[in-house]
Image (cartoon, helix red, strand yellow):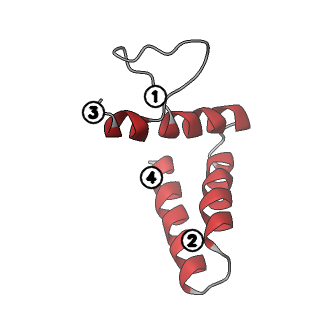
Amino acid sequence: MTLTIAAYGMILLIVYLLIREKCSLAPVFILVPVAAALCCGFSMTEIAGFVAQGIWYEDEEYKLTKGTLRCRYVQQEMGG
């Protein structure tokens, strides 16, 4: 329940900052979620893991080699 409240608060803060033109897009979409995650008790290592999960993923069909990761959008464009 706490994470839900934090998520709604984060969305409201982002909308407020963007509507009132208090900040540009990049700082709002980078700093606000990180600050919200820190307030919820997550460490920077855990937050980095969330970011990595959101951008990269491992698929059995495309086994990753030598520690390189493929972007899901590139795989989708390739028909994967």
Mark 1 packing: few (<14 Cα in 10 Å), some, or many (20+)? few
Evaluate if marks 4 and 3 touch, with contact meaning CB atoms under 8 Å apart: no
Q: Position of residue 17 (x, y in %)?
A: 60, 78
Whether residue 16 sits left or right of residue 31 in the image: it is: left
Image quarter in which the C terminus is found:
top left
- The residue wearing badge 4 is 4
Give the farthest residue toward the front. Answer: 78
- The residue wearing badge 1 is 57
Q: Residue at x 60, y 55 (%)?
A: 33
Upstream in the sequence, badge 4 or badge 2?
4
Upstream in the sequence, badge 4 or badge 3?
4
Whether residue 32 sits left or right of residue 62 in the image: it is: right
Label 3, secondary structure: give it.
loop
* Labels 4, 2: front one: 2
Q: Residue at x 68, y 65 (%)?
A: 27
Label 2, secondary structure: give it.
helix
Upstream in the sequence, badge 3 or badge 2?
2
Q: Amino acid at mark 3?
A: Gly
Checking the image for residue 13, the label placed there is: 2
- The residue wearing badge 3 is 79
Q: Position of residue 78 (x, y in %)?
A: 33, 34
Evaluate if marks 2 and 1 touch, with contact meaning CB atoms under 8 Å apart: no
* Labels 3, 2: front one: 3
Disc 3 and disc 2: Cα gap in Å?
38 Å
Q: Position of residue 72 (x, y in %)?
A: 41, 36
Q: Residue at x 70, y 36 (%)?
A: 43
